[in-house]
Amino acid sequence: MTTQSNNTIPGKIVTPAELRAVASDGTKLRYAFMELAAEIPDAIALGRGDPDLNTPEHVIAAAKAAVHDGRADVPTPAAGLPALRAAVAAKLRADNGIPVDSDGVLITGGGQEGLYLLIQTLLDPGDEILVPDPRYTSYDQAITQAGAQMVLVPTYAEDDFDLRPEEVESAITPATKALLIVTPSNPTAGIVTPKNLRAIARLAEKHNLVVISDEIYEQYVYQPSTHLSIASLPGMYERTITLGGVSKTYAMTGWRIGYAAGPPDFIEAMTAVKGAATGAAATVSQYAALAAITGPQDVVTEYFGIYARRRQLMMDGLRELGFSFSEPRGAFFIYTNAASCGIPAFELSYLLLKEGHVLIFPGTAFGEKWVDWLRISLLQPEDKLREALDRMTTVLQRHM
Ligand SMILES: Cc1ncc(COP(=O)(O)O)c(C=O)c1O
């Protein structure tokens, strides 16, 4: 979007009015806020969900080796490097209990491409897909572009944003083809509890639904919560596509490697779409992902400890500010209700960025009705999080 006036920078969106103009599209809204933050040199970014930690050294070494010995020059089959497909299948069998082999795995350009290809392959115009709200709005775009209909299923703060089976069932119509589950969730950091997941699996069987299970945050689940893959439940592998990737688990967003796993005939159909669109994922990144998945996993434990400390620090700080939230069960976000400060969350996000130089996305970037909510990501070191809390306090004192 290009706008010009005295207080705008050509090509940049910098006024609340201009932000509002894109407010109905969650993805555009997030990007508009990020553009604005990019103009503020000392901005503390608690917006995007991309890990700030470094990619593990042994992963970088594997990528360098692939470049130096000429393996990176060679494109892989569209479905991915056979060794990586096998490694993902082995991981899903061992860690997640999903009975998948290599032919049930497609390597994608990040989870993002995985979700897009999946939606395009699965949904036809007129199909309905159930999507828990609030949501990662990249799904909105993919669903709209497939000509399908998104049907929102509400989730509730008082349930810690678990997904209620009865809400799922009441949203089902004869046109419902699929159900999306994102656990742990972006933006709420809630999880679907095993009990509800089992009940939802029974509904999927009863109503013959395909389940898309986006488990990109699966490694970051805080005790006593636990992660369960719906595809591991009896009868569910046949009707479930599981999405995952290395971006979140191994701090590898820029390497762009994700995967989709499910019944081989569906994966073959997705691979045809991928082949036509982009061909295989970058070879060098596939070797890096192979090292990440098959190498030492202590780095994940280390990252988890870092996120857990940040989570505690931010929860303590938000409580002092009078914000309410349900404790994050997973991922690295806090979805908080800011109604107590009396400023609509959209305006509050804008004020926090313009005056406090802290980037936090308004809840409306994840669904129209979340006008009192903010999503805070924990992807800054602890000293920056403390500084962000101080700045938030100053802005709030000025306006309340
Ligand atoms: C729920 C969810 N799925 C998928 C993705 C895509 O991740 P990536 O493309 O970095 O693997 C994201 C990224 O934020 C996400 O939040």
Image (tube, rainbow, N blue to C red):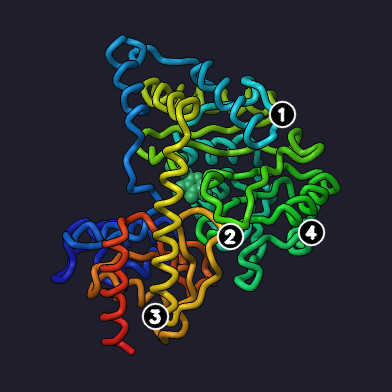
Check disc 2 and report the residue beneath it.
Answer: 190
Q: 145 above or below 157?
A: above
Within 10 Å of disc 4 (Cα), the crowding (few <14, some 14-19, many 20+) is some
| Callout 1 amino acid | Pro
Residue at (59, 37) in percent of width and height: 118
Residue 52 point in image, percent of width and height:
33, 48
Q: 247 above or below 287?
A: below
Residue at (44, 51) in percent of width and height: 305
- Residue 321's label in the rendered image is 3
- Residues at marks 1 and 3, CA–CA distance in whole angstroms: 47 Å
| Callout 2 amino acid | Gly
Q: Nearer the viewer, residue 18 or 241?
A: 241
Check disc 4 and report the residue beneath it.
Answer: 169
Q: Is residue 24 visible?
A: no
Q: Secondary structure at mark 4?
A: helix
Circle 4/circle 2 CB separation < 8 Å: no
Q: 56 above or below 162?
A: above
Locate the C terminus by quadrant.
Answer: bottom left
Q: Secondary structure at mark 3?
A: loop
